[in-house]
Amino acid sequence: KSKDLQGYAPICLGLEDFYTRRLYLRIQDCFGRPIASAPDAWFDVVERYSNDNNKTLHRTENISKCLNLGSYNYLGFAASDEYCTPRVVESLKRYSSSTCSVRVDGGTTKLHIELEELVARFVGKPASLVFGMGYVTNSAIIPVIMGKGGLIISDSLNHNSIVNGARGSGATVRVFQHNSPSHLEEVLREQIANGQPRTHRPWKKIIVIVEGIYSMEGELCKLPEIIAVCKKYKAYTYLDEAHSIGAVGKSGRGVCELLGVDTADVDIMMGTFTKSFGSCGGYIAASKEIIQYLKFTCPAHLYATSMSAPAVQQAISSMKVILGEDGSNRGAQKLTRIRENSNFFRSELQKMGFEVLGDNDSPVMPIMLYNPAKIPAFSRECLRQNVAVVTVAFPATPLLLARARICISASHTREDLIKGLEVISKVGDLVGIKYFPVEPEKK
Ligand code: PMP
């Protein structure tokens, strides 16, 4: 019942099931209700998204229009788009909402082939393969390329889909400290030598898995340094670009473009269509040999119903806009806009005294709350003022590192951002999360 929570939150942390790692957290509000049922604190059921590129949404109750600061809709392609939407509607008429077939038995349309060629060209790899879900792309591919006798070295903050894929693969899994090339090198050295002379290499193959932008940190991968270590120790690299593809880089080609990395140095490039492209599904882009191998061996390719055609069409159309192949320069404008919006919002939050994680140019901006009991208060007060933010805590983050995660979109106007900042500032004062108070300027 601490004062800084304005009578809201406190607090009971119940840690259950520790040994099975299904550890989860129960935070109760002052009436003893788990926060999952804290009234008015969440926007877990959405009545509808507005017809304005997902910039606002309508909550179920009181149908108020909220500024959406939580969507992965980085380039604003979700909902209506003058180029994408008519084509998606056309593809729905032509191919219906589901192929109702697996890829190898009638579930491959011309659109699937077109998307795979386009993705390969877009990310700069010889070939690609698409899947109906981003999550499954990781969790099903990793066990196909890695198995017993192999070593996976995974960043400690990698997404759950990677963690699950690695665990299910049967390979040995080691974790290196988040975004630390020097610790990666330590782990590699230890694993390769393994008490033996350096010439002895006990693993069939070694793969290092990282993300382009870390989804809970907003941080860019130290990719050039990590690649240098992988080359030195002859390890393969696997890069998940769910949050970076389309969102960063001069022409939207992700962290490789932004950080000047040659895509030939990344063996497997994974990404999703659910963020910058406003669609559904995921892809793997790699050498022709690897893609061919996946086509013959990956159960998620052989036995799962293929990506729905309208979703494929949405990914194709939005990618063409980004490439300028729609005959306009809207793609370039969106890329400039998301960069400017992100850098503006981040620097304003910092000026207000918030602790904001992540790097410049990244549209993902976690504001640290630390105490998980501040989550319902923060979310509820923002919603009351018609701003929807996503709050995250354990197990998506370490236990005492709860945060609100802002995602910026190219479809936000400067007025939207200023409104969002005003609300967040007021709520930040109320909940007590301005950890770096700024001295007022002396006149
Ligand atoms: N990888 C990362 C890094 C992610 O953040 C996510 C989900 N946000 C996924 C994979 C899974 O993608 P999807 O939501 O498209 O299934």
Image (cartoon, rainbow, N blue to C red):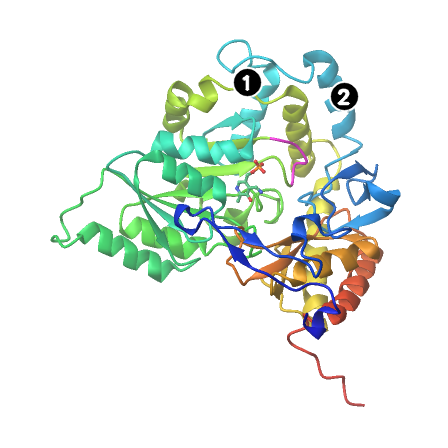
Identify the residue at image location x=29%, y=55%. Answer: 187
- Quadrant holding ligand 1? top right
**Neighbour tally class for label 1: few under 14, some 14-19, many 20 plus, Cα within 10 Å:** many
Q: Is residue 291 above or below residue 275?
A: above
Reply above or below: 263 against 101.
below
**Residue 380 visible here:** yes
Query: What's the magenta bit mostly, secondary-structure-wise?
Result: loop
In this picture, which residue range is highlighted in magenta?
276-280
Instruction: State yes or no: residue 277 in magenta.
Output: yes
Q: Quadrant of residue 180?
A: bottom left
Q: Amino acid at mark 2?
A: Val
Distance (Cα) linking label 1 and label 2: 21 Å
Secondary structure beneath dot 2 equals helix
Q: Quadrant of the N terminus?
A: bottom right
Q: Residue at x 23, y 51 (%)?
A: 191
Circle nearer the viewer, 1 or 2 = 1
Q: Position of residue 242 (x, y in %)?
A: 55, 42
Q: Position of residue 152 (x, y in %)?
A: 33, 43
Residue carrying label 1: 305
| Of 41 and 95, the residue lying toward us | 41
